[in-house]
Image (cartoon, helix red, strand yellow):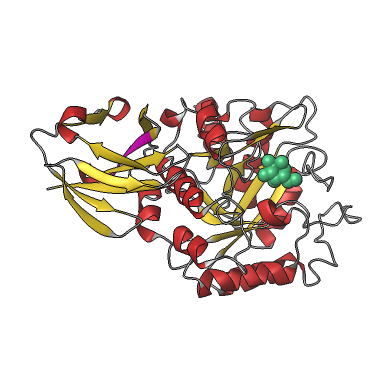
């Protein structure tokens, strides 16, 4: 009997201390991260300014929540007790004050570190300090941790991320745990119970379909990332997402390309983490990022990642099943010129094998809503006709009639 009690207590304690915080990121996280535009050139004024813009530009209202400081927020050395310290020049009032500011706006605060001995930018990493760092973040009221993978030598990825997960759990504050090991160790296969999202590739770059090699890794544009990770949709769902990286909307692609990029990240149920300077963003960029109808596709409660339906005649067509038997459908014009679609619903029919969802368009009609132009486009009883500019998108929601 005694033995049984001991086994029971051990099981209870393992259960208490070795699982991620549940109930977080039930839909993909929405937010902003400093890296794509600012790299390590970040400071308190910038971050406060971004928080202000969340409110002013209607981004908070559209659902964006997390403001995440990426690499470069720390001093180059830990203090005498081994604690991380905020860079005193960049963040003169420290991290707790910044967290308080962000929270006072009704937003949430995210921070970055790395599983290795140093971060990718050469700042102190968490290796060997996981529990101490987790306690510190909790004391600063951090809500989100992006955890990178530089300088990890022969560390086992699953083990390293589990250690940090356990450290966060032990620290007791619910913190979204965003795994960033670039897909090197196929985190989609093991990270469901470890983190709330995992990066699936190396770093994004602000181009439509380019790839730039850096020796052991490449930066990839929007379509290179999408095409590299086609077969992992079954691993994503509420609380555990494939992360296609921070967005490059507003960072130099055309407005049409930005619309397509945003539509695709929404179809893929990826975290939507803005990566541009919101203080100088154009009207068109804000219009794209704050589009509630598109965001609703990303945030759909079913949490099913979309998939490629077809790729013909220069059109990528993607589908995503939504709640209440609705669907999102996205047509992207991959060509260099404006093209027309004349889409015959009856001829095509569609469904999602993985989730056992099928639609018989001979029996069932759907109404069609254009999510970028905020217009109703009739229903599926006649062909869907539209002109779509080069690299632009028609994104629709279909609702059963
Ligand atoms: C890696 C990550 C990036 C960014 C940098 C910071 O490259 O993949 O997203 O966090 O490190 O140094």
Region in magenta: 316-322
Query: Where in the image, quadrant-wise, is ligand 1 located?
Result: top right
Q: Quadrant of residue 371?
A: bottom left
Q: Is residue 303 magenta?
A: no
Query: Quick check: 47 above or below 127?
Result: below
Q: Quadrant of residue 185?
A: top right
Q: How many marks?
A: 0
Measured as percent of width and height from the top left, residue 378 is found at 16, 51
Q: Is residue 11 left or right of residue 377?
A: right
Q: Is residue 317 magenta?
A: yes
The outermost residue toward the right is 80
Q: Residue at x 43, y 47 (%)?
A: 392
Q: Is residue 324 left or right of residue 121?
A: left
Q: Can residue 290 be seen in this snapshot? A: yes
Q: Residue at x 57, y 29 (%)?
A: 187
Measured as percent of width and height from the top left, residue 29 is found at 50, 51
The outermost residue toward the front is 337
Q: Is residue 131 left or right of residue 224?
A: right
Q: Nearer the viewer, residue 357 or 249?
A: 249
Measured as percent of width and height from the top left, residue 289 is found at 48, 59
Q: Main secondary structure of the magenta part?
A: strand
Q: Residue at x 23, y 37 (%)?
A: 343
Q: Can residue 23 be seen in this snapshot? A: no
Measured as percent of width and height from the top left, residue 231 is found at 46, 25
Q: Quadrant of residue 383?
A: top left
Q: Residue at x 33, y 58 (%)?
A: 373
């Amino acid at each position: 009997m005694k033995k049984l009690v001991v086994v029971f207590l051990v099981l209870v304690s393992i259960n208490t201390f070795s699982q991620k915080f549940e109930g977080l990121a039930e839909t993909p996280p929405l937010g902003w991260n400093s890296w794509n535009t600012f790299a390590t050139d970040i400071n308190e004024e910038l971050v406060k300014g971004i928080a202000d813009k969340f409110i002013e530009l209607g981004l908070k209202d559209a659902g964006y929540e997390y403001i995440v400081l990426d690499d470069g927020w720390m001093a180059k050395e830990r203090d005498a007790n081994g604690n991380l310290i905020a860079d005193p020049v960049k963040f003169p009032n420290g991290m707790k004050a910044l967290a308080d500011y962000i929270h006072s706006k009704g937003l949430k605060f995210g921070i970055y570190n790395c599983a290795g001995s140093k971060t990718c930018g050469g700042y102190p990493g968490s290796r060997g300090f996981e529990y101490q760092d987790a306690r510190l973040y909790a004391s600063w009221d951090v809500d989100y941790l992006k955890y990178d993978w530089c300088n990890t030598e022969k560390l086992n990825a699953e083990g390293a991320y589990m250690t940090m997960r356990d450290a966060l759990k032990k620290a007791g504050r619910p913190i979204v745990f965003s795994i960033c090991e670039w897909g090197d160790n196929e985190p989609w296969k093991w990270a469901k119970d470890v983190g709330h999202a995992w990066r699936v590739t190396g770093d994004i770059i602000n181009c439509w379909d380019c790839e730039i090699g850096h020796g052991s890794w490449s930066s990839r544009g929007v379509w290179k990332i999408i095409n590299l990770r086609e077969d992992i949709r079954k691993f994503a769902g509420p609380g555990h997402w494939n992360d296609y990286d921070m967005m490059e909307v507003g960072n130099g692609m055309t407005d049409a390309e930005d619309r397509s990029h945003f539509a695709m990240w929404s179809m893929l149920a990826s975290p939507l983490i803005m990566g541009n300077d919101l203080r100088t963003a154009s009207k068109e960029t804000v219009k794209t990022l704050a589009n509630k109808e598109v965001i609703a596709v990303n945030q759909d409660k079913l949490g099913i990642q979309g998939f490629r339906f077809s790729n013909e005649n220069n059109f990528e067509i993607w589908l995503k099943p939504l709640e209440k038997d609705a669907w999102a459908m996205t047509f992207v014009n991959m060509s260099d010129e404006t093209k027309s679609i004349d889409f015959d619903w009856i001829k095509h029919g569609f469904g999602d094998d993985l989730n056992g969802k099928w639609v018989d368009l001979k029996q069932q009609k759907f109404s069609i809503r254009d999510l970028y132009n905020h217009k109703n486009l009739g229903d599926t009883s006649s062909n869907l006709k539209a002109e779509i500019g080069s690299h632009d998108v028609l994104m629709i929601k279909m609702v059963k009639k």
